[in-house]
Image (cartoon, rainbow, N blue to C red):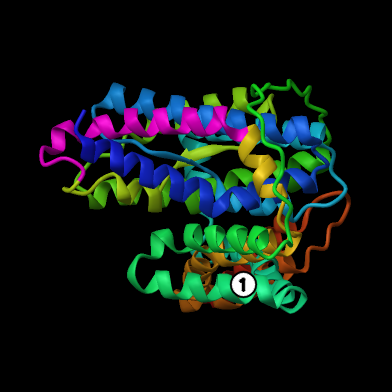
């Protein structure tokens, strides 16, 4: 095991954890998870990524790096009126649909038939409200947030992957240094998985489970496969979907949302600097898995530390972390002229956050966009 494999795995894992852990905590808070359930969520999703990455890398002898669904966490965080048990049922459904996508070709074709612009607009509608909260956080605590933004902007010029992690370090350091946060008493509690029996609610399954599946497929798995192809590897698509779907279904029972192919963090682990022999580069998946096991086991202490700063720090961190995904989603939403109006409708409805019949805005945004798209297609047909 070369040191370059270990260093790449450590950097990738820390970037993935530090840049979006605040969003996972926001998602847990949105569905009413208590402290024990939140810690179980983080532990389960870390272990799911570890098991999946090691399994797929060793099985296929190619570097496969998994991540938690960042847009999925944003989608969960945007929900209201959902209990943790209902959310777990939605997580199980999303995981099951990912697994079925590997087994049933018609399901995969149905997902592929959704225009890319409309799918991207739904993601943009989910992300936009969180990015807008960054300005409010800066207004409420300028002494903490503006230096975070400055650090983010400067580091991003040289290393975009580390910019959010640097902003997190700056925010936490300032919070403790200025007395805005009190140093907590951090012990070494053993992580305890908490089993959560799912509560099956049709409205939540449709309004959260289905959009969670769609954003995970469109915004995480497909780009993840593309990153592997760009690095010269043939991604194990069917196996990856089956493994991530199966593992996600199990970890969901302990509070975790879906895991999927990584894109940004995967790019860190696929370059020539990781290992000169591309046939040996798959071992980075094992090192990456080991780091995520350590992060999962240390999650109780880490969560106590992250909970100490004022809430504006986490809100600003989420806003900064989602700027890149929002930029990509908006670019995708308006890339094709034929779907721009339908994408705008999808973005507006999803971003409104309005639920109807117990079903969340992301689903209605998708439906509205598809209806408008279908109407325009009918109108465009020659008589």
Which span is picked out in magenta?
274-299
Q: Give whichever of 375, 67 is nearer the camera.
A: 67
**Is 286 covered by the magenta stretch?**
yes
Taking the image as drawn, is residue 370 in sight?
no
Q: Give whichever of 123, 23 is nearer the camera.
A: 23
Residue 310 position (above or below residue 341): above
- Residue under the point 53% across and 37% down: 259
Quarter of the rendering containing residue 236: top left
- Residue under the point 47% across and 48% down: 16
Q: Quadrant of the N terminus?
A: top left
Q: Where residue 375 sits in the image (x, y, percent)? A: 64, 70
Q: Is residue 345 left or right of residue 226?
A: right
Residue 141 position (above or below residue 79): below
Q: Give whichever of 219, 162 is nearer the camera.
A: 162
Residue at numbered disc 1: 342
Q: Quadrant of the C terminus?
A: bottom right
- Residue under the point 61% across and 40% down: 302
Taking the image as drawn, is residue 308 in sight?
yes
Q: Where residue 58 sits in the image (x, y, percent)? A: 29, 23
Q: Give whichever of 171, 61 is nearer the camera.
A: 171
Q: Is residue 264 left or right of residue 167?
A: left
Residue 295 position (above or below residue 73): above
Q: Residue furthest left?
A: 277
Q: Where residue 43 sits in the image (x, y, percent)? A: 60, 30
- Label the magenta part by its dominant secondary structure: helix
Q: Where residue 120 sits in the image (x, y, percent)? A: 54, 63
């Amino acid at each position: 095991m070369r040191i370059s494999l270990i260093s790449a795995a450590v950097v990738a894992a820390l970037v993935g954890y530090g840049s979006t852990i605040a969003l996972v905590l926001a998602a847990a808070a949105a569905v009413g998870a208590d402290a024990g359930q939140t810690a179980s969520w983080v532990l389960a999703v870390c272990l799911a990524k570890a098991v999946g990455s090691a399994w797929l890398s060793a099985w296929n002898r190619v570097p496969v790096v998994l991540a938690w669904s960042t847009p999925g966490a944003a989608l969960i965080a945007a929900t209201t009126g959902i209990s943790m048990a209902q959310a777990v049922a939605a997580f199980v459904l999303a995981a099951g649909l990912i697994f079925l996508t590997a087994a049933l070709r018609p399901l995969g074709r149905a997902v592929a038939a959704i225009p890319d612009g409309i799918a991207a607009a739904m993601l943009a509608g989910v992300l936009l409200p969180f990015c807008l909260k960054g300005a409010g956080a800066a207004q409420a605590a300028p002494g903490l947030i503006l230096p975070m933004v400055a650090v983010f902007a400067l580091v991003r010029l040289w290393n975009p992957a580390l910019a959010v992690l640097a902003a997190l370090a700056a925010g936490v350091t300032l919070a403790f240094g200025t007395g805005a946060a009190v140093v907590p008493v951090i012990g070494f509690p053993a992580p305890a998985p908490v089993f959560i029996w799912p509560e099956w609610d049709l409205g939540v399954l449709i309004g959260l489970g289905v959009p969670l599946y769609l954003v995970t497929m469109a915004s995480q798995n497909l780009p993840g496969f593309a990153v592997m192809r760009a690095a010269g590897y043939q991604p194990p698509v069917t196996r990856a979907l089956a493994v991530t779907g199966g593992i996600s279904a199990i970890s969901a029972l302990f509070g975790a949302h879906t895991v999927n192919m990584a894109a940004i963090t995967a790019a860190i682990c696929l370059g020539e600097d990781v290992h000169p022999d591309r046939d040996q580069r798959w071992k980075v998946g094992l090192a990456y898995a080991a780091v995520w096991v350590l992060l999962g086991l240390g999650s109780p202490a880490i969560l106590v530390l992250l909970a100490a700063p004022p809430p504006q720090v986490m809100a600003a961190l989420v806003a900064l972390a989602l700027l890149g995904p929002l930029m990509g989603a908006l670019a995708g939403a308006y890339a094709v002229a034929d779907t721009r109006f339908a994408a705008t409708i999808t973005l507006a409805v999803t971003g409104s956050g309005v639920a109807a019949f117990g079903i969340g805005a992301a689903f209605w945004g998708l439906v509205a966009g598809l209806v408008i798209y279908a109407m325009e297609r009918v109108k465009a047909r020659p008589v």
